[in-house]
Amino acid sequence: MIDVGIDAAEIWTGKLKLDLAETFAPEKGDDPGKYTKGLGLYESSFPDTYEDIVTMGANASKRLMERNDLEPDDIGRIDVATESSFDNSKPISTYIAGCLEQTFDGDFHHANKGERKFACVAGTQAIDDAYNWIRAGRNRGRAAIVVATDTALYARGDPGEATQGAGAVAMLISEDPSLVTLSDEQGYGSADETDFLKPNQQFPSVDGKRSVQVYLARMREAVEDYESVAGEIHPDDFVYAPFHTPFPGMVRKAALLAYRHITRDTEIEEALAEQIGMQPREAEFDDEETFLDAVSDYTDELKETTRYQEWYEATIDPTLDIARHVGNWYTGSVHVARLAALKRAHEAGRDMTDERLFVASYGSGAQAEVHHETVQEGWKEEITQLNIDEQVEARYDLDFAEYETVHDAHDHSKDRDYEEFTAPDAEFVFDGWGRMGERK
Ligand code: CAA
């Protein structure tokens, strides 16, 4: 069976930043610690007024193709994952392909284009579709481009406003990839949920507290389902575990529960059995709240232990390096987390070849998916190419009034004629709905 996975990746951040501690917290009358310590977020990225999901996705894809010396003829599939689409008919991939055709020789008339939607898990689902397409032998030697692109905005005043963000991740999916191969085994936890939804509206209706519980419940099911096909897993089986990161504080909660589940430590199990009055692996709970209540005393103690803290620092913390400074990118978020971890490994001089990652994706509505990935020999060259640090550093720092202007500029119900805060540099820019051009 051929190995299929991610061959190359590019990250494109929105060019503006909102500093949560310095700019957002004072306006909201909040202690900055709520954002930096509680949510684990320092800054959020926002698109400039000439950027949107198409331009960010197209700019990331352009760089991906140029860097890998690719022409349209090498690509047989372009899939976009987004929950920020402005078009209910034409997929965003057609807009992105249209941009790319302005730059490269040839066109994508032969390519299968689509759009995947299942909140934030859609990016991983689009990778799965490309994986299956290649594995089925329908790709005729061509690779797929998967773009996860979102402008994650909440209505002003919504508690989610602190967790906004915007950016795109473009990934090349191919046979014998340079970065990671994907496992055949996957685990799912999926249910019809209404804690986060956008029925015919741009900004989500969110029950934030419940959304946290739904994330944890579906993730628990997905880990159990994964073990039913891949066998028991243990904390040291994986060097890093990138999770979907709406904000790092969410990952702190999910990682703690996952660790509890996969330690299989008899001492832990006995203490927990005593606390909840039954064997935890056999216990059934009415809902996640009851489960979380039952295990809370135990997990409160667990997170103070040295072995948990060492595992968290080594396995989870590196995955959050970028998210802390860019916020939630919805579909791109778990893919940013994977790259952040590999970047940290590279900076630490660690050899990751043949090491395993445990990748945990999640989308509201709701579905969690987990699988593992094996890092390939070419990973270091790929990671060296990332310039996300320079992009993050170069962002324009918005004051609060400017932030409100930018929020309005990206509100689909409002006029889009606003000042630009940065100058585009040989990149695709928004030029009116459905008209994206390259401005030199
Ligand atoms: N110092 C340190 N910590 C502080 C603090 C301070 N001064 N003040 C508050 N905190 C802590 C709180 O204790 C809390 O931590 P814990 O959850 O560990 O207790 C944390 O900071 C946040 O404070 P609040 O719970 O009071 O924050 P909030 O209620 O205003 O908002 C939220 C939190 C509901 C998650 C909100 O950000 C939200 O609605 N976000 C959007 C929905 C979301 O992201 N849900 C995540 C799961 S769904 C998903 O993952 C899909 C997706 O991408 C959207």
Image: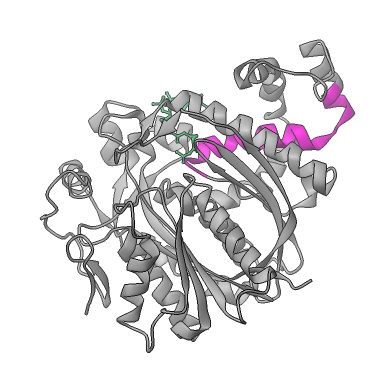
For this rendering, which residue is in front, 422 or 34?
422
- In the picture, which quadrant includes the N terminus? bottom right
- In the picture, which quadrant includes the C terminus? bottom left
Q: Residue furthest top?
A: 277
Residue 266 on image: x %, y %:
89, 28
SS assignment for the magenta stretch, majority: helix
Residue 33 shows up from this direction: no
Residue 390 on image: x %, y %:
39, 67
Instruction: Please give the name of the residue rendered at 31% of the width and 29% of the height, measured from the top-left corner.
Output: 158
Instruction: Please give the name of the residue rendered at 27% of the width and 35% of the height, measured from the top-left corner.
Output: 155
Residue 372 shows up from this direction: yes
Up-down: is 354 above or below 332? below
Up-down: is 309 above or below 52? above
Residue 415 on image: x %, y %:
11, 49
Instruction: Please give the name of the residue rendered at 56% of the width and 29% of the height, measured from the top-left corner.
Output: 214
Residue 48 on image: x %, y %:
24, 58
Q: Quadrant of ligand 1?
A: top left
For this rendering, which residue is in front, 424 or 301?
424
Question: Is residue 66 found left or right of 151 in the rendered image?
Answer: right
Question: Is residue 307 found left or right of 393 in the rendered image?
Answer: right
Q: Which residues are magenta?
A: 245-269
Residue 188 is drawn in which quadrant? top right
Question: Is residue 86 found left or right of 145 in the rendered image?
Answer: left
